[in-house]
Image (tube, coloured by chain):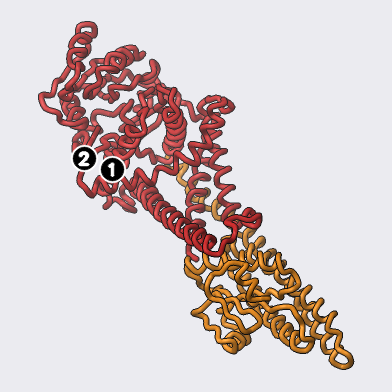
Chain colours: A orange, B red
């Protein structure tokens, strides 16, 4: 009896490999779907940013329409802030592949462009809104930094709810090894060791946790 | 990011064993309760080792003599009981002429008691019965036929829990059913690794060949089974009959019993480690020892990861709360309830569902009413909470071994 049923070990192994393989395949498909969704959102955002920059170029040929440029820029910032939340949710799930990391990098470059654009518009139009750039530790934050960043995110989310279009909230990874961002943050004296950092109007640097009301005071 | 891969390894191994058991069951389901008729009249004696069993010994002996089989003698070894066990035995001796009492002046342990009885037993088969266990009337009639095969050295049967009033007893009743069917399934691949104490029939010749029970081992029933396997004897399981036994009704007793089982298992691994993957030792080296090692290793690894994650989460929550208080931000918002399930979550759910289906199969095969209200509640609890305690018991067993404590009761 024993001899004749020994093959059950191999049969079980083969079926396990098959079922397990299908499970992992489905998992990778789900992850790829999430990545491609993030990719789609990114492409739309990329087009959106190019559109804004083209508009700015057009305005620079003649009379610059500041109201429209500011409005478009703020609308766009709001959109990519929402997309950042979706990306964050995908990233918090345990993953088998690292494909989302690339999407994150692409978004960071996009946010850097948005920041530059926002600085330009502010200067050109003497706009009253405030650039609030949140630079966080993305690659390997310690447990302490992670907790601190979670609270920073909540503070900024509250701030955005309160201030609405009076602030341009741009969160981006400060340690994603992107030359453009490295140059930008170095320009405002932010180092990777200091992350997370909130930079208000490229002048005020916040590295310690503060109440929303205190940050509000800095914005006024 | 090694954790997802550790989870996947766990899932793969669990899935493998689940499929293995399912395949064996599907292949043999029609004859799972069958047993061979004995082709001769085997001479049988029963051995009951006793230590402080005044509450149950009379009933056990009554049940043994009620067995529908002609027994040559019933040898009870009183291992220096400090209660009224010996007096009760002397009284019973007047009613049962075939009852033979051996009285130890010093407590020698269960294995030594069994070995002393083996020395005087002169039958072809010896039946070991625990002092708190009641074999079914038909048990021996259905079990002895397996010895028609000259290679069979031991035959076991399902052990069911007799006391099922308390919650902990009900959970053990589920566990015993699970163990019973899986042991029968392991029979089909010659991988039975224990012939439990409540009721096991042994070929006397096989026990003599291996010099009886190991006095140093804390689970003589596991050790004797490994020893028989080592010596090339087959072990069989008769699912059509049963023995009922008393399960611990308090957490402390339950924990001590399980710790002893685990210590015994570890002792066996240590004793037979040289047989690991030894082709001459068959399933002992290729299934039983690796299975035990894997269970130990995976259990402990799982426990370590569990502690790591819990500690990490606790620190993280503490820091988050601390920083939230500093910044005066809300601790919870709606966003915190948004769940993004990963592949590991899906696989975990799939594995749980498959495990649950297997448990339902066990209940259905053993004719247990699945839709009983208490089963509907107890089965998920058994799968989620009860089984999660296993690694803790293993850890306690290892600690016990390191400290050198040996308690066989």
Quadrant into which the C terminus of chain B falls: top left
Looking at the picture, tell me which residue is in the foreground, B78 or B373: B373
Q: Chain of mark 2?
A: B
- The disc placed on residue B263 is 1
Percent of width and height locating residue A212: 62, 67
Q: Secondary structure at mark 1?
A: helix
Residue B253, above or below B93 = below
Viewer can see residue B282: no
- The disc placed on residue B157 is none
| Side of A71 where A173 appears, left or right | left
Residue that appears at 58% across and 67% down: A211
Percent of width and height locating residue B65: 30, 13
* Alpha carbon separation for disc pair 1 and 2: 9 Å
Quarter-of-image position of residue B169: top left
Percent of width and height locating residue A8: 49, 45
| Mark nearer the N terminus (1 vs 2) | 1
Q: Secondary structure at mark 2?
A: loop
Q: Are marks 1 and 2 in contact (CB under 8 Å)?
A: yes
| Side of A31 where B26 appears, left or right | left
Residue that appears at 64% across and 73% down: A217
**Residue, far right:** A62
Looking at the picture, tell me which residue is in the foreground, B54 or A65: A65
Looking at the picture, tell me which residue is in the foreground, B310 or B225: B310
Looking at the picture, tell me which residue is in the foreground, B371 or B354: B371
- The disc placed on residue B406 is 2
Viewer can see residue A147: yes
């Amino acid at each position: 009896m024993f001899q004749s049923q020994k093959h059950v070990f191999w049969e079980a192994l083969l079926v396990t490999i098959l079922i397990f393989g299908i499970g992992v395949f489905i998992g990778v498909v789900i992850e790829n779907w999430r990545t491609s969704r993030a990719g789609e959102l990114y492409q739309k955002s990329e087009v959106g940013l190019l559109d804004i920059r083209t508009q700015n170029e057009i305005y620079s040929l003649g009379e610059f329409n500041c109201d429209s440029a500011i409005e478009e820029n703020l609308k766009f910032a709001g959109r990519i802030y929402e997309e950042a939340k979706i990306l964050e949710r995908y990233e918090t799930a345990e993953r088998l592949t690292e494909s989302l990391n690339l999407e994150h990098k692409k978004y960071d470059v996009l946010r850097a462009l948005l920041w530059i654009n926002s600085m330009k518009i502010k200067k050109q139009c003497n706009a009253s809104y405030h650039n609030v750039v949140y630079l966080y530790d993305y690659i390997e934050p310690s447990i302490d930094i992670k907790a601190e960043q979670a609270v920073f995110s909540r503070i900024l989310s509250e701030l955005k709810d309160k201030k609405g279009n009076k602030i341009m909230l741009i969160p981006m990874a400060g340690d994603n090894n992107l030359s453009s961002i490295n140059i930008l943050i170095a320009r405002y004296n932010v180092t990777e060791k200091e992350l997370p950092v909130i930079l208000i109007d490229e002048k005020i640097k916040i590295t310690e946790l503060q109440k929303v009301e205190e940050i509000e005071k800095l914005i006024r | 990011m090694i954790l997802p891969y550790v989870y996947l390894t766990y899932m793969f191994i669990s899935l493998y064993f689940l499929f293995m058991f399912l395949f064996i069951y599907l292949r043999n389901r029609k004859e799972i309760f069958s047993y061979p008729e004995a082709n001769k009249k085997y001479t049988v004696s029963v051995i009951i080792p006793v230590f402080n069993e005044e509450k149950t010994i009379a009933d056990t002996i009554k049940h043994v003599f009620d067995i529908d089989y002609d027994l040559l003698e019933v040898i009870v070894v009183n291992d220096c009981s400090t209660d009224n066990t010996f007096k009760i035995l002397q009284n019973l001796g007047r009613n049962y002429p075939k009852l033979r009492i051996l009285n130890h002046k010093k407590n020698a342990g269960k294995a030594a008691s069994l070995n002393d009885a083996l020395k005087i037993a002169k039958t072809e088969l010896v039946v070991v019965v625990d002092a708190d266990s009641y074999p079914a009337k038909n048990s021996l009639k259905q079990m002895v036929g397996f010895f028609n095969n000259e290679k069979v050295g031991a035959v076991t049967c399902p052990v069911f829990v007799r006391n099922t009033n308390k919650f902990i007893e009900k959970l053990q009743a589920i566990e015993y059913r699970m163990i019973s069917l899986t042991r029968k399934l392991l029979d089909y691949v010659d991988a039975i690794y224990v012939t439990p104490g409540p009721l096991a029939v042994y070929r006397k010749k096989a026990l003599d060949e291996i010099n009886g029970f190991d006095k140093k081992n804390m689970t003589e029933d596991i050790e004797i089974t490994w020893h028989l396997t080592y010596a090339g004897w087959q072990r069989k399981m008769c699912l059509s009959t049963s023995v009922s036994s008393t399960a611990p009704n308090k957490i402390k007793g339950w924990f001590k019993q399980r710790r002893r089982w685990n210590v015994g298992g570890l002792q066996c691994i240590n004793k037979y480690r040289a047989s690991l993957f030894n082709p001459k030792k068959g399933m002992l080296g290729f299934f039983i020892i690796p299975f035990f090692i894997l269970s130990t290793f995976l259990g402990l690894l799982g426990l370590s990861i569990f502690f790591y994650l819990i500690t990490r989460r606790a620190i993280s929550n503490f820091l988050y709360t601390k920083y939230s208080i500093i910044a005066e931000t809300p601790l919870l918002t709606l966003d915190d309830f948004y769940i993004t399930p990963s592949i590991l979550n899906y696989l975990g759910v799939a594995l749980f569902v498959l495990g649950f289906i297997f448990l339902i199969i066990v209940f259905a095969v053993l004719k247990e009413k699945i839709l009983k209200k208490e089963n509907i509640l107890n089965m998920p609890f058994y799968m989620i909470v009860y089984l999660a305690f296993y690694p803790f018991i293993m850890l306690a067993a290892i600690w016990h071994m390191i400290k050198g404590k040996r308690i066989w009761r």
